[in-house]
Amino acid sequence: MKRLLFVGMVLLLVLSTSTVFGFELGRFDGTTIKACFIGGGDYEKIYEKFIPEFEELTGAKVEIVYKGNGFDIDKKMKIDFAAGTVDYDVCWDHTSFFSQYLDFLEPLEGYFTQEELSDFSQKVLQYCQKDGHLWQIPRHGDVSTLHYRTDLLNDPENKKAFQEKYGKELKVPETWDEFKEIALFLSKPPEIYGTQFAGKEEALSGRFWDILMSHGGKIIDENYKPTFNSPEGIKVATMLRDLYQAGAMPPGMVNFLWDDVAGTFANGNIAMYTEWYGWYSYFQNPEASKVAGKFDISRQPKGDAGIHGGWAGAHCFSVTKSSKNKEAAVAFIKFITSYEPQLFEAQIGYIPVRNSVFETLIQEAEKSTDPLIKKRFEIMQIQINEDFTPPPIVAEWIPISNVLYPKLQAIMLGDVEVEEGLNQAAKEVELIMEEAGYYD
Amino acid sequence: MNQEMNLRLKKDLKKSSKNDRYLSWFMIIPALAVVAVLIVVPMIYSFSLSLTNMNLLKPASTQFIGFRNYIRLFQDEIFWRAFWNTILFMTLAVNVEFILGLFIAQLMFKVTRGQGVIRTAIMAPMMFAPVLVGFQFKWFFNDQVGLVNNLLYSLTGDYQIIPWLIHYPMNLLAILIAEIWMSTPFMVIIFLAGLVSLPTEPFEAASVDGASGWQQFRYITLPLISPFIYIAMVIRSLDLGRAYDLVRIMTGGGPANRSEMIWTYTHRLAITNNRFGMGTAMSFITVAVSFAFVIYLFRQLSKSLQEVY
């Protein structure tokens, strides 16, 4: 009996060293997997906790050869790919960036079974694919959601005044038209501005695209021709201009990036705006934020096409085409994107992309005294599964964005008329696409 | 006989000077090789890149396109805005830093006690990384919660939201203030070194002759320290020609390209837009502008050296 128990334990030990959460990882003794990862702050906690576990399970060694922020890695990888100096097997990737690297990445669909992928949000996985191949596996995601001040929207005086002015109830906007109306109504500058958006770089062009998409518009069509100067595009740019010119947005907004908009909202100057989930603990901290306990969240408003906006992105992992340890690299990705690491990251604030992790989080949130915690996870799960939409998956998205955002700024500042500005940008984007060989 | 000896001597001299010339060339070969490897070859290579359509994401499809990048840039309205903004920024920053630097150096020169402490304190802004200075001043000039608008409110009692970083030329002025704060100490230190090294006799003689303080400054101090002034201005011009960090952090060259500088635009073209060929062409134009500034300042320097010595 004792002998049987011993054999059973040994068998269990052997199995446990090669299998994790139902996935067969395999043994890779003596193999060193080199990695190029996003670094800084909480991003690294997952490496510290789970890389040693992976090494123990598989016998492989993981060596991080480069760590940097997303933009630095993007630059590094583009230069490494161009110069042929890639010395890593696994790399950080992102739904907004991966289409630039396709020539240098290993397609992953052959390495994963349907079962292994079934727990991931299928909407997120959809944006990890291009040209019929799966290029990256999501680690965690983010999606933009509407943050609004409950004290302002529920204020009886505001409600009464809104009813008198518009003949309808003041409530959380469900469409972008309502959003504009309420933003204009709630503005009392310089104390309160109706809304704001991060007003430069991809933050602005991405927001333009977010609203454009909900109206049924596109940045480029199937033939890679720019179409953002369509009636839908004109409507979005007009909304941005009208809100800015009417003083319903802070004057400095066209120089704001993510931390600036979060700071202005936390300072109590903004009635509502679309924001990422990651700032929640900052907004709810009464020592740092004047809006702690005074705000709520909801899905972003719908556009004319009945689509909820949901600008989103996901941090992912890819395997380089030049890797000599592809099997080991894939095993590492399977491990690091599995349930446990995703739950661990979700508990420190990141948004998971596995439905099983959401279920655990919602169950845990039921015990919380803050009712917004549970609501937050529920909306988050709906958005990750239904609204998640990254910007156009073309390698030229960032160059397109770099053409678009200065024109949007010029439109908002009144330097150029809406249609003329969008037409000028469309002309420049067409040139970029032509140079990139899309029309050959 | 003498004639024959003279001819031989001339021949020998010619031969030895020829040998010396060969030897001297031979001796500088290592230095030339280093310069060639580190400067000439990369310059030629990058110039050749500027004549191509190289895209960072598609290096294999690079084609020679002649001067098309340069022609496009010269037709590009944003390029010209960035170009003139850079020239204006360089000119204003160098001159204001020069005036302020000279003024502060003069004051410090007169200080008899605690000069070491003051010198260290004056140097403090130089110790910050430009990126940090950029964040600091971006915050100062934030229209909503920034120090400047709040200070104006405290002084006037009128709460005005002045969007410093949005409207031109206020945004350029804000960047200029940050740059001047950060870099004037460099000028102060150089000028102070110049002032300390001046002989005392001309000043004593001028005092005996009844020259006023201003006259002594104008006709003795200024000409004598002019070599220091031009050296400092050359170094600062080259630094300012590369202005990137502060602009990138404070305005990103915007909004709507209003505060665009050559290097912010170059970075956008070459790295974020992947148009390496175009970006390299723009870098060459920048180098040409910097060369022009340096040549002008070096000419002034040699003129002043001739006058002084």
Image (cartoon, rainbow, N blue to C red):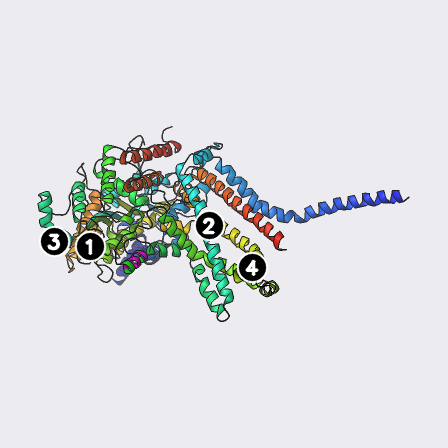
**Tag count in the figure?**
4
Q: Badge 4: how crowded within 10 Å, few (<14), some, or many (20+)?
A: some
Q: For residue A361, which numbered disc appears in the image? A: 1
Quarter of the image for the N terminus of chain A: give it: bottom left
Q: Secondary structure at mark 2?
A: helix
For mark 1, give the secondary structure: helix
Q: Which residues are magenta?
A: B148-153
Q: Label 3, label 1: how many angstroms apart (C-alpha)?
A: 32 Å
Q: Amino acid at mark 3?
A: Asp
Among numbered discs 4 and 2, the one appearing first in the sequence: 4
Q: Amino acid at mark 2?
A: Leu
Indicate whether B230 appears above or below A208. Answer: below
Reading the image, the residue beneath label 3 is: A155
* Subunit ID for the residue under disc 1: A
| Mark 4 vs mark 1, CA separation in Å | 75 Å
**Chain letter for mark 4:** B
Q: Mark 4 = which residue?
A: B221
- Residue holding disc 2: B240
Q: Of helix, strand and loop, which one carries label 4?
A: helix
On the same chain, marks 4 and 2? The answer is yes
**C-alpha gap between disc 3 and disc 2:** 53 Å
Contact, CB < 8 Å: mark 3 with mark 1? no
